[in-house]
């Protein structure tokens, strides 16, 4: 049974969420397959904007920033991604029909989680990473479109959450005027 508060599937929320999810998911898939076929050999940087932005093919069997579950990384992070997607579905379901900003943010996070989950399930070599940002030998972790999407979506969700959770401001107090005797 459909929750009437959630609105029809073509509500503003749905029209924001689904395109964000599909576009980012497809962009992530296409760029990862491109990286696998064009950025070889692995771990060889290809400069895009000098040394600051490079494309370097890498495979990550662990999670972001080197987080690892050892031999259980593939299974563990697959299960974590499935749980995260279920939680995101619940958040989507509870999002008001006209909350397009939150719907886009949820779509970004879901697309990223789904993109990396697909790599983990389909390929034993792990998640394809290829965006390499830094200066000289000081480099940020190599990442992909899915990782960037998760990060941007999470930041947007946090911003929308802080915006909607601000307590109503109390009305300005009327200044008291002290009466003086003449």
Image (cartoon, rainbow, N blue to C red):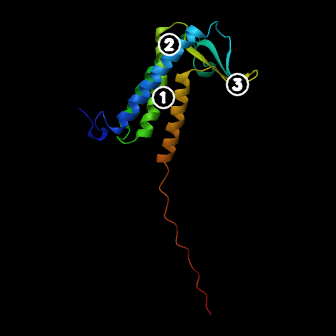
Q: Which mark is residue 109?
A: 1
User: Within 10 Å of the Cα at label 3, are there few (<14), some (14-19), or many (20+) other Cα atoms?
Assistant: some
Q: Position of residue 180 (x, y in %)?
A: 61, 87
Element at label 2:
helix
Q: Which residue is mark 3?
A: 52
Q: Which residue is mark 2?
A: 120
Which one is closest to the eye, mark 3 or mark 1? 3
User: Within 10 Å of the Cα at label 1, are there few (<14), some (14-19), or many (20+) other Cα atoms?
Assistant: many
Element at label 3:
loop
Q: Which mark is residue 42?
A: none
Q: Position of residue 67 (x, y in %)?
A: 61, 19
Q: Position of residue 112 (x, y in %)?
A: 49, 24
Pick whichever, 158 or 79, lies toward us. 158
Relative side of 116 to 132, left or right: left
N-terminal label among 2 and 3: 3
Residue 111 can be seen, yes or no: yes
């Amino acid at each position: 049974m459909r929750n009437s508060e959630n609105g029809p599937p073509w509500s503003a929320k749905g029209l924001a969420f689904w395109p964000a999810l599909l576009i980012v998911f497809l962009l992530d898939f296409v760029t990862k397959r491109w990286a696998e076929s064009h950025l070889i050999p692995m771990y060889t940087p290809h400069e895009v904007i000098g040394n600051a932005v490079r494309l370097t093919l890498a495979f990550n069997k662990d999670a972001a920033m080197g987080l690892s579950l050892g031999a259980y990384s593939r299974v563990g992070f697959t299960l974590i991604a499935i749980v995260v997607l279920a939680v995101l579905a619940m958040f989507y379901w509870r999002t008001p029909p006209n909350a397009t900003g939150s719907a886009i943010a949820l779509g970004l996070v879901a697309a990223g989680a789904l993109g990396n989950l697909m790599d983990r399930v389909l390929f034993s070599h792990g998640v394809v990473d290829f965006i390499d940002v830094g200066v000289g030998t000081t480099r940020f972790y190599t990442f992909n479109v899915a990782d960037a999407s998760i990060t941007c979506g999470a930041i947007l969700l946090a911003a929308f959450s802080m915006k909607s959770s601000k307590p109503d401001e109390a009305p300005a107090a009327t200044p008291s005027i002290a009466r003086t005797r003449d």
